[in-house]
Amino acid sequence: MAAPRLRLRRGSTNPEGNVTNALTGEPFVDTTGDNFYIADSASTFIHVGGSSYTSRVDSFLTAKTTTVGDIVTLKEGTTNGSNTIDIKAPASVTASYDLTLPAAKPGSAGVYLLEYDQATEVLSFAPSVAGESVETQNTNTDSSFFLTFVDSNNSSAGLETVFTDGELSYNPNSDILTVSGSVSVGSTGIDIAGSTSGTVTLVTAAAAGTTTITLPATTGTVVTTGDSGTVTSTMIANDTIVNADINASAGIVDTKLATISTADKVAISALDIDGGTATTLLADADLIIVDDGGGGTNRKAALTTVTDYTFAKVSGDVTVTSAGVATIQANSVALGTDTTGNYVGDVTAGEGLAKTSSAGEGQTVDLAFKNAANLTSNTVLKWDDGNTQLVNSSIVDDGSTVTITGNLTVTGSNTVTNVQTTNTQVTDALLELGNGTTGTPATTRDIGLIMERGDESNVFVGFDEDLDLFIAGFTTNTGSNTTAGTITPIAFLSLAYNVTDTAGTNEVVIGYNGTSSQRELQNIVVDAGTYW
């Protein structure tokens, strides 16, 4: 027989990014690039050989091509993301040269430039020089900026003295100039543009000395002498309007009126009952208004007066007290005539029952099983259709043991039968599982035995329909499930395993014949499979 052979896990590209379940130390082969890798975790690998071997440096070094120079890639921390910075060599370099970084950082804080010394090919830090130029930026962001002023109109080449006043700022987005201090304006005044068109000019008349105009401290409209129609009631002080100032057609709301106590001043048609606040709960102490005797004399009455008057009018088979308690007179209600719904006039015994009394006023109806005297304790009953009564069956249940004196046949789809005994002995030589199965079995319909192991995982031995394999392994499912569930395979203890093809000619032997020199591993090819 041929000696065993080993095939490593292989693919047509780098396993990095394609394999996530590697074992540390497991070898991989890239068959396209002829490269060899060793896994150092489940999804990362060390490049240890091959036609393009660059070991670990291939994670940050990209080799040059005909159009691009070498690239050094600097990656950010893995907890921040996957962004990188590439330092690239030009595709074409006139002559070789070195760039040497500074030997030390600057000695103090500030803005520095990197200078290159062509003679020494060394980079060094140099402080930036102020005064050579000022860069400005045109912005339209919605924020305020402080304006900068020069000390004088300096036309010389020297530095200009500039300063910024924190009380003056400008927002380019809203075109608003804000002054937090005082503003001085020339004699021509101030022009204010309207929101749509036109302008308003504020200008002062000639005056000696200083004139102060105090504006209101609240939002509102300033009314000028030429303005009309904009004076509102809020501008008029209280207690300044007298009766002569009110027009005869003016409407004044009743909340401004004093209590009306003069008789015949309010007609009943003027009462807005529908507009009043509704109440859903009346009490005996609530009052109503009545016209006593219809003679025009108004009186008040409590609700109890209304109920007393109403209940006193009730007569016949029902009487009502002043407290609202209703009483139905004896023998005044006829069933079926004065009532609604169903009532029971009599009871008739159906099949299997016997009636021993008749219906009557206050009578209790007695019903009993037919053949009750012949029924046996602890015996399951069955129906005797010929005699329309219950009789004893062949099943006896004394609370701990069920005894069946005849044969037992269990039928049905997906029937689960629990048999709990110390040991079960079956005299049949063949045991058929899944009897009656038709068509193609579902992939979840496993066939076999499940062994209950208490707190430990159960064991399944049988055929896994999904994998098309005979398998033995651990499972969390029980005999009440219709599938064996997820199976973790376990090994058989055997002196030898012989595996052949369907013809029985190509045989693989894995065996142990009792001594270390008699271990067998023949015709074996260990294939780790492909990953991509």
Image (tube, rainbow, N blue to C red):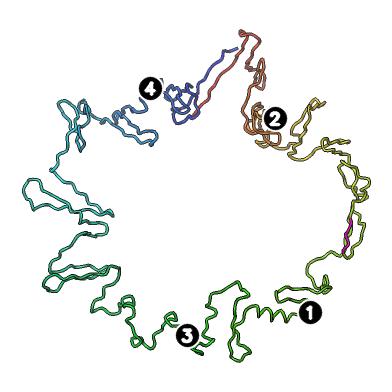
Residue 313, image x and y in percent? Answer: 73, 82
> Relative to residue 185, is residue 206 depicted above or below?
below
Front residue (pair 105, 134): 105
Q: CA distance from mark 3 to mark 4?
A: 106 Å
Our reading of the magenta stretch's main secondary structure is: loop
Front residue (pair 277, 510): 277
Q: Is residue 84 magenta?
A: no
> Relative to residue 223, is residue 10 depicted above or below?
above
Question: Mark 3 or 1, which is nearer the eye?
Answer: 3
Residue neighbourhood size for the residue with mark 4, other residues' Cα within 10 Å, grouped as few (<14), some (14–19), many (≥20): few
The magenta span reads: 362-366
Question: Mark 1 or 4, which is nearer the eye?
Answer: 1
Q: CA distance from mark 1 to mark 4?
A: 113 Å
CB of mark 3 within 8 Å of CB of mark 2? no
CB of mark 1 within 8 Å of CB of mark 4? no
CB of mark 3 within 8 Å of CB of mark 4? no
Q: What residue did someone put label 4 on?
A: 55
Mark 4 element type: helix
Residue 416, image x and y in percent? Answer: 74, 37
User: Amino acid type of disc 2?
Assistant: Glu
Mark 1 element type: loop
Q: Is residue 365 magenta?
A: yes
User: Amino acid type of disc 3?
Assistant: Ile
Q: What residue did someone put label 3 on?
A: 260
Q: What residue did someone put label 1 on?
A: 316
User: Amino acid type of disc 1?
Assistant: Gly
For the view shown, which residue lies furthest in the left direction?
156
Front residue (pair 285, 523): 285
> Residue 235's image quarter?
bottom left
Question: Mark 3 or 4, which is nearer the eye?
Answer: 3
